[in-house]
């Protein structure tokens, strides 16, 4: 089969490499992403003001690596809250992230931007959901001015009380109704919430704009219980052409603001390069398998 069996950008999540984004960590992460055979790195914008945009741009150019960025809001900056102060605080964080994304020259910014990345003790209220939709709509409009696509990452029930499934995501995104808003699915979360990975991808269809490939325990791909074949067959069926980013976490590489929220307590791996090169081959094999069925 030819080298052009697929055209998706294949990405690696920043926490495969380093817990922060100091100049040394940024260079190491971008250089390693390239060396492991990836096209793109997903940079963590949990603290967007801590990202040196000019340096990041220079390093991406030096290594010819593309980038996306992601963040999750907190309960203090929850745009799905009924508390207008929290909504305002959340919109300020999103504006900061957008500003840095523009300075780096990114075209994609995503994550749990519609509410807090947190376990909630109660369901979302009608007013909270309306606040979330309003905030995301304003954010999309601001991002559209700089040609940036906004992605909403659909996460499991322990990390959001608002969007846990593809079906909820489609309904929500249709309500927001902005052309630069896409759905971001993640196999780790789908493995908990979806009935069928293939059906979930088809349900999103053209609204799907970003994909995270993660294992059920967030470690090595293929060593857990995720139905990757169903997911990749779905991507083939909708001719998905967007990025596919490998995401994995271990207590070996920690960013407290994110790792603790995601309950990363165990040491699933300790060799980032071995993990990443294995995942790169795994994704390649899945995409080639799907492509091989197109003409038979
Ligand atoms: Mn994810």
Image: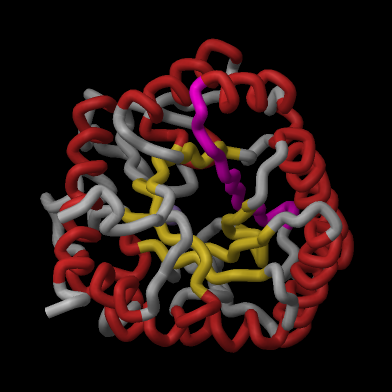
| Observer able to see residue 96 | yes
Q: Quadrant of residue 257?
A: top right
Q: Nearer the viewer, residue 188 or 9?
A: 9
| Observer able to see residue 227 | no
Q: Quadrant of ligand 1?
A: bottom left
Residue 273 at x, y = what percent? 26, 25
Q: How many labels were placed on the picture?
A: 0
Q: Nearer the viewer, residue 248 or 268?
A: 248
Say above or below: 8 vs 292.
above
Say above or below: 137 vs 97.
below
Quarter the N terminus occupies: bottom left
Q: Residue at x 59, y 70 (%)?
A: 182
Q: Residue at x 23, y 24 (%)?
A: 271
Residue 195 at x, y = what percent? 28, 84
Quarter the C terminus occupies: bottom left
Q: Quadrant of residue 80?
A: bottom right
In this rendering, position of residue 206 left or right of residue 130: left
**The magenta stretch spans which residues?**
63-77
Residue 188 at x, y = what percent? 32, 60
Say above or below: 43 vs 149.
above
In this rendering, position of residue 218 left or right of residue 245: left
In this rendering, position of residue 155 left or right of residue 273: right
Report the residue that reaches farthest toward the top. 24
């Amino acid at each position: 089969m030819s080298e052009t069996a697929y055209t998706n950008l294949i990405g690696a999540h920043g926490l495969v490499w380093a817990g922060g984004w100091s100049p040394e960590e940024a260079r190491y992460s971008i250089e390693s992403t390239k060396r492991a055979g990836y096209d793109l790195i997903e940079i963590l914008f949990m603290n967007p003001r801590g990202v040196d945009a000019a340096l990041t741009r220079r390093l991406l150019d030096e290594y010819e690596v593309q980038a996306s960025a992601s963040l999750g809001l907190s309960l203090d900056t929850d745009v799905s809250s009924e508390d207008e102060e929290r909504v305002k605080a959340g919109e300020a964080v999103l504006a900061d992230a957008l500003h840095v994304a523009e300075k780096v020259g990114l075209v994609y910014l995503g994550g749990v931007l519609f509410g807090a990345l947190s376990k909630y003790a109660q369901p979302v209220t009608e007013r909270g959901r309306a606040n979330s939709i309003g905030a995301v709509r304003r954010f999309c409009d601001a991002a559209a001015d700089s040609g940036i696509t906004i992605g909403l990452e659909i996460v499991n029930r322990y990390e959001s009380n608002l969007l846990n499934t593809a079906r909820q995501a489609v309904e929500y995104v249709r309500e927001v109704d902005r052309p630069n808003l896409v759905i971001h699915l993640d196999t780790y979360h789908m493995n908990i919430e979806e009935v069928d990975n293939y059906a979930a991808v088809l349900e999103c269809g053209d609204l799907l704009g970003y994909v995270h490939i993660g294992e059920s325990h967030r470690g090595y791909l293929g060593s857990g219980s995720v139905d990757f074949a169903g997911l990749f067959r779905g991507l083939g069926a909708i001719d998905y052409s967007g990025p596919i980013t490998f995401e994995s976490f271990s207590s070996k590489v920690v960013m407290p603001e994110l790792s603790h929220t995601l309950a990363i307590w165990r040491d699933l791996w300790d060799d980032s390069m071995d993990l990443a090169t294995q995942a790169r081959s795994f994704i390649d094999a899945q995409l080639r398998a799907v492509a091989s069925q197109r003409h038979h």
